[in-house]
Image: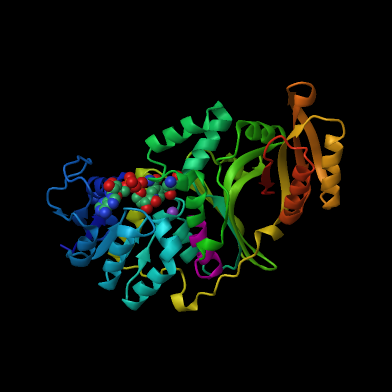
Amino acid sequence: MTKPLRIGIAGLGTVGASLARLLQTKAGSILHRAGRPIEVVAVSARDRAKDRGFDAGAMEWHDDPVTLAAQADIDGFVELIGGADGPALECVTAALKRGIPVVTANKALLAHHGVDLARLAAANGTEVLYEAAVAGGIPIIKTMRESLSGNDVTRVYGILNGTCNYMLTRMEREGLSFDVCLKDAQDLGYAEADPTFDIGGFDAAHKLAILTSLAFGTEIDSGSIYIEGIERVTSEDIAAAKDLGYTIKLLAVAQLTDTGIEQRVHPALIPAAAAMAQVSGVTNAVAVDTDLLGSIMLAGPGAGGDATASAVLSDIMDLATGVVLPTLGIPVDKLKPYTRARMRAHEGGYYIRLSVHDRVGAIAAIATRMAQNEISLESIVQRRSSGHGDKAIATVILVTHETTESAVRAALLSISEDGHLAGEAQMLRIEQLD
Ligand SMILES: NC(=O)C1=CN([C@@H]2O[C@H](COP(=O)(O)OP(=O)(O)OC[C@H]3O[C@@H](n4cnc5c(N)ncnc54)[C@H](O)[C@@H]3O)[C@@H](O)[C@H]2O)C=CC1
Ligand SMILES: N[C@@H](CC=O)C(=O)O
Ligand code: NA
């Protein structure tokens, strides 16, 4: 029989356990497609006694994933522990130093150390594969590295965090609270071990950092991403956006501008009729604007054990069949430095929700501050008031025409200094998508 591909898996949580199960239950079709068996010969996890739904009897057990990566007799090393540093970085480094290819789903690791790991892989004649690291099961890494390699990209954007999209969808459709939705996302295996990474926008930023590099042939620079999470999005914003004809999504966007590449992650109002507005629940979507294709969009499950394991499995199949590509699409020494476009120069429309002391002239004063900063208003609506007399507070919602981030920030500062606000202003960007 053809020589099997021997792999070691470090981390047997949601994704690792799904992968190990699939490699056993789908062994027949994997052999048929890969032309050789794929055998898990070594594993590393924390709890040896736990039943994870697959037969680990013949697998070599390592308490330490670094020992597995450094010593086991394997052809490929699969890292499914997670985390930018610590054991994940150490075991991946150990495998690459031996010239053993690495498959990982770890976007935090790649966002922080991707270029160094690509360099280490190239120096040792091997590669890092990471289809699962961006948008879970959606084959976006293959699409960017292989299928779009002849295209010049002007923008890549999408819904890259399944947890946030699941939460926003349920908050909008079922009126459930933030905390209930988060707990359900955790129970379903969508959230990161520390869910702050999801709701704070950091996980989507890690994925965006990787996409930016592939899209523009630049070094990964996750530190330059403007990041806002969904923690401050309220049910009031979701309802107001709906009345205005929009849906709120956590968007990740990287686009070429006159001054560099803008990388940003934040909740955004997108037109309810746009294709991306239909992407609901744990589903992710990635759109790429290119010179040759115009715009393409891929959508599919962005998180969850089997969906993510599907992407990991596709990388392992590539190892079995011998497909080798530069880790970041082009040789690592040919990557351009990343040039950052400042967020203050961002141009677009804005949704602004203000809690205003309901006094004579307050709305006129707010409109004046907007005009002084050359912001043209599409609408200004007083939605409702609470309290009476001096204590009366009104909710005022403004929608601007296209303006700049710096103008909006300056106007909000003046409005706040004028003493009209009874609480912190909410400011969400509007993304005009087709
Ligand atoms: N869950 C999902 O839907 C997706 C997860 N990912 C990524 O996949 C990776 C794994 O994620 P999950 O399986 O969800 O996480 P998880 O938390 O369910 O699993 C991680 C496993 O690693 C084990 N572990 C931690 N330290 C270890 C050590 N020193 N040695 C051996 N094992 C150790 C933990 O005990 C745990 O079982 C992460 O990088 C995550 O960001 C990527 C896409 C989707
Ligand atoms: N926590 C992540 C998992 C996949 O990357 C998400 O919710 O998208
Ligand atoms: Na993917």
Q: Going by the image, does 390 lie left or right of 80?
A: right
Q: Residue furthest top?
A: 388
Check the image and report above or below for 305 versus 89.
above
Q: Nearer the viewer, residue 199 or 290?
A: 199
* Residue 188, percent from left and from top: 39, 36
Q: Is residue 46 magenta?
A: no
User: Which residue is painted at 56% across and 68% down in the image?
Assistant: 216
* Residue 348, percent from left and from top: 72, 52
Q: Main secondary structure of the magenta part?
A: helix
Q: Nearer the viewer, residue 406 or 252?
A: 406
User: Which residue is painted at 83% across and 30% down in the image?
Assistant: 359
What is the span of residues highlighted in magenta in the rendered image?
Answer: 207-220
Q: Going by the image, does 271 lie left or right of 107?
A: right
Check the image and report above or below for 392 versus 41.
above
* Residue 53, percent from left and from top: 22, 40
Quarter of the view holding residue 185: top left
Check the image and report above or below for 4 versus 202.
below
Q: Nearer the viewer, residue 118 or 294?
A: 118
Q: Number of labelled discs?
A: 0
Q: Is residue 326 visible?
A: no
* Residue 274, percent from left and from top: 65, 44
The quarter of the image holding the N terminus is bottom left
Q: Residue furthest left?
A: 58
Q: Going by the image, does 381 lie left or right of 88?
A: right
User: Which residue is painted at 42% across and 62% down in the image?
Assistant: 110
Quarter of the view holding residue 77: bottom left
Q: Is residue 429 visible?
A: yes
Scheme of image coloration: rainbow
Check the image and report above or below for 236 versus 373.
above
